[in-house]
Amino acid sequence: MIKTISIALSLLTIGVASADSHFKAGQYEFVKMAVTPDNRVEGYYHEVMGEGVSRTCKFFFEGAIDPDGYTYVNTWLDTNIEGVIDNQIDSLFIELANDHPGCSSVTAGEAKYGLNLSLLENKPWIGLGVIKEAKVYLNLAPIAGTESKVYIVKDDVISIIDVKDDYTSIEYINNNNKSFKGWIKNSSYSSIKNVK
């Protein structure tokens, strides 16, 4: 657990407001967050700053939902860093013990003091995954022979909607914020927990 005064103060100030709220799966500013059937959160933070030569901050997070409305999470990409999140009425609060490599140049170090990100759209996401094959076509139905022309590529982060037999219903949102939905084989992606 994180033992810093700033986190304790943040939890005191936001804990009262969020005691009645619950975590909402959805697209937040820079964050995709899923709420799993076993009351856990899985998320992916991805922010790019600048044109041409750009800076990127990205990391995954996961943790068990606390009944008080906030939860401690483990975050990772290159480094494991503990943090805390709170889902408020229309926003998500993220605070980390330290910045991930490269993130301080994008977030100006604010992740250590708390980021408040607006909810853009509620989503029915029950998990997140990462594509592990070079190219995966989206199917129109959870059966073979229904491939569309839309495909996603290795290392794309997907949001899981449902799992049916050997197929998973997913949503992929590209860098231009365009959404694509379809079915993919379960074997074509890994849980974000396997990215560590």
Image (cartoon, rainbow, N blue to C red):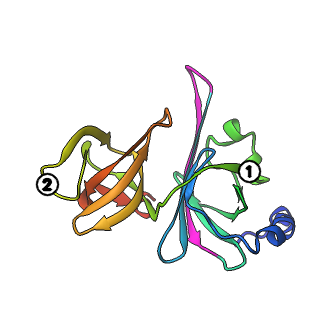
Q: Earlier in the sequence, mark 1 or mark 2?
A: 1
> Please, what secondary structure does the residue beneath circle 1 have?
strand
Q: Secondary structure at mark 2?
A: loop
Q: CA distance from mark 1 to mark 2?
A: 43 Å
* Magenta-colored stretch includes residue 11: no
Q: What percent of the width, then of the height, locates residue 98?
A: 70, 54
Q: Most extreme residue toward the bottom, as rendered?
A: 67
At x 83%, y 63%, the residue is 10
Figure quadrant of residue 22: bottom right
Mark 2 neighbour density, 10 Å: few (under 14) some (14–19) many (20 or more) = few
Indicate whether 85 appears above or below 112: below
Pointer 2: what residue?
144
Amino acid bearing label 2: Ala
* 147 or 62, nearer to the observer: 147
Q: Position of residue 44 (x, y in %)?
A: 53, 52
Does residue 165 appear left or right of residue 98 in this picture? left
Q: Residue furthest left?
A: 145
Q: Identify the residue at image location x=28%, y=38%.
A: 150
Seen at 82% across and 65% down, the residue is 14
Q: Which mark is residue 59?
A: none
Q: Provide residue 122's location: percent of width, then percent of height.
A: 57, 55
**Image quadrant for the N terminus?**
bottom right
Residue found 75% across the figure and 44% down from its top: 109
- Is residue 78 visible in the rendered image? The answer is yes
Which residue range is magenta in the image? 50-65
Query: Which of 146/6 is in front?
Result: 146
Residue type at mark 1? Leu
- Which residue is disc 1 drawn over? 115
Does 63 appear in magenta?
Answer: yes
